[in-house]
Image (spheres, rainbow, N blue to C red):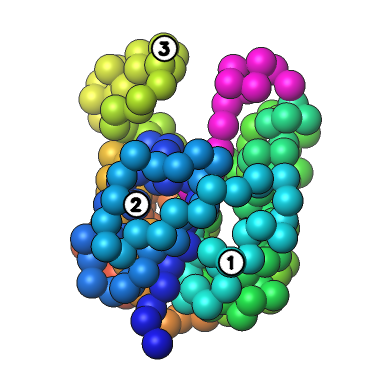
Amino acid sequence: MSRKACLLGATGLIGQHLLQVLLKDAYYEEVHVLVRKALDYSDPKLVVHSIDFSQPAAYKPAIQGAETVFCAIGTTLKKVKGDREAYRKIDYDIPVAAAVTAAEAGVFGFVLVSSIGADAANNNNFYLKLKGVVEEAVSKQQLPQVHIFRPSLLLGNRSEKRTGERIAQALAPVYSLFLKGSWKKYHPIQADLVARAMLKAAKSSAKGIFIHDYTGIMQFIKDPHQESPIPI
């Protein structure tokens, strides 16, 4: 039986890189992608599922039989015109529905892109609170292995325009010099490095809940065996 991966968020900054590393790496023989619209891309390993993400049952064909589900899906308040409920339907409902489906299907690993500072108890920041709530919901599923990646500012070229992010990226080389010690976790990171670390994490047979910030991600790039489970 061929080894299968499933990816949500293949059109985002990390997701685009992740799709490429999944297709190029020999570990997975099939890569199933869940999207709203068909991808303008083809590969012998790639299977595209165009679905209605508001229907959890639609996730099952792509997730069934997968060894790992990768979730790099996300949006911005600007994209949903400030509608927090619409934002929640994307950033919470989709990852959690995928995790629930994965657990029911007997998937071994779930790899989630979250954010540095994610905290379900943070009532002062909608974004970070929601990310924390998503982490908690995913971690409660009966999944043998959960990897949560918490990058800070992502470096790379997006297809969409994010003026504030571009300014931050331009200033990154300067302020990164001061991010040491406990502040190092806020260090900007290239999106392709996060994608590569996610793949290495998924290849591990270790069971548990693992959280990776900047330092952990960079350790993964150097040595995929340097991981420590952190219960949520």
Count the numbered circles shown.
3
Question: Could you tell whether 203 is left or right of 174 in the image?
Answer: right
- Residue 46 appears in the picture as rendered: yes
Q: Which region shows up in magenta?
A: 72-83
The amino acid type, in three-letter code, at marker 3 is Thr
Question: Could you tell whether 11 is left or right of 35 in the image?
Answer: left
| Residue that mark 1 sits on | 61
The mark found on residue 163 in the picture is 3
> Is residue 221 part of the magenta span, yes or no?
no
Q: Name the dominant secondary structure of the magenta segment.
A: loop
Quarter of the N terminus within the rendering: bottom left
Residue at image coords 63%, 59%: 59
In the image, is residue 164 above or below residue 46? above
Q: Distance of mark 3 from mark 2, alpha carbons?
A: 24 Å
Residue at image coords 35%, 13%: 167
Q: Secondary structure under badge 3? A: helix
* 141 and 47: which is toward the camera: 47
Give the percent coordinates (x, y) of residue 84: 74, 26
The amino acid type, in three-letter code, at marker 2 is Leu
Give the percent coordinates (x, y) of residue 51: 60, 48
Mark nearer the viewer, 1 or 3: 1
Mark 2 closeness class: few <14, some 14–19, many ≥20 residues within 10 Å: many
The mark found on residue 18 in the picture is 2
Give the percent coordinates (x, y) of residue 118: 61, 43
The amino acid type, in three-letter code, at marker 1 is Pro
Query: Image quarter for residue 122?
Result: top right
* 160 and 129: which is toward the camera: 160
Q: Do the residues labelled 1 and 3 touch (CB within 8 Å)?
A: no
Q: Which of marks 1 and 3 is nearer the N terminus?
A: 1
Give the percent coordinates (x, y) of residue 33: 46, 55
